[in-house]
Amino acid sequence: MHDPIKNTSAKMAVIVEPISLAFITSTKMAIIIEPISLAFIVYVGYDEFTGKSIGLRPVHDKARLIFMDLFS
């Protein structure tokens, strides 16, 4: 069988390249998502301790809070 890549290091580079791209992609995603999630956690913590209980809120505020929790 004819091997078009005779150099062993070139074979390794072909195998390692997709893995390094996966690490770069996950790093970029973590950098983008982390501030959003931290802001959400701070907001939920602030709302939990300073806001009204969910039964005393207007319907619009209840729905907004519930959907924010569901989709985050």
Image: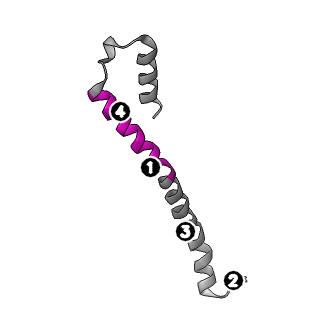
Q: Nearer the viewer, residue 32 or 12?
A: 32
The x, y position of residue 70, in whole percent, is 44, 28
Q: Residue at x 73, y 82 (%)?
A: 4
Q: Residue at x 36, y 14 (%)?
A: 57
Tell whether label 2 touches label 1 (CB within 8 Å). no
* Range of residues picked out in magenta: 32-49
First of labels 4, 2 by sequence position? 2
First of labels 4, 1 by sequence position? 1
What is the CA distance from the residue labelled 3 to the residue labelled 2?
Answer: 21 Å
Choose mark 3 or mark 4, whichever is in front.
Answer: 4
Q: Residue at x 42, y 23 (%)?
A: 66
Residue beneath disc 4: 44
Of all residues, the one furthest to the left in this rendering is 49
What is the CA distance from the residue labelled 4 to the residue labelled 1?
Answer: 15 Å
Residue beneath disc 2: 5
Q: Is residue 67 above or below residue 27?
A: above
Residue beneath disc 3: 20
Mark 3 crowdedness (10 Å alpha carbons): few <14, some 14-19, many ≥20:
few
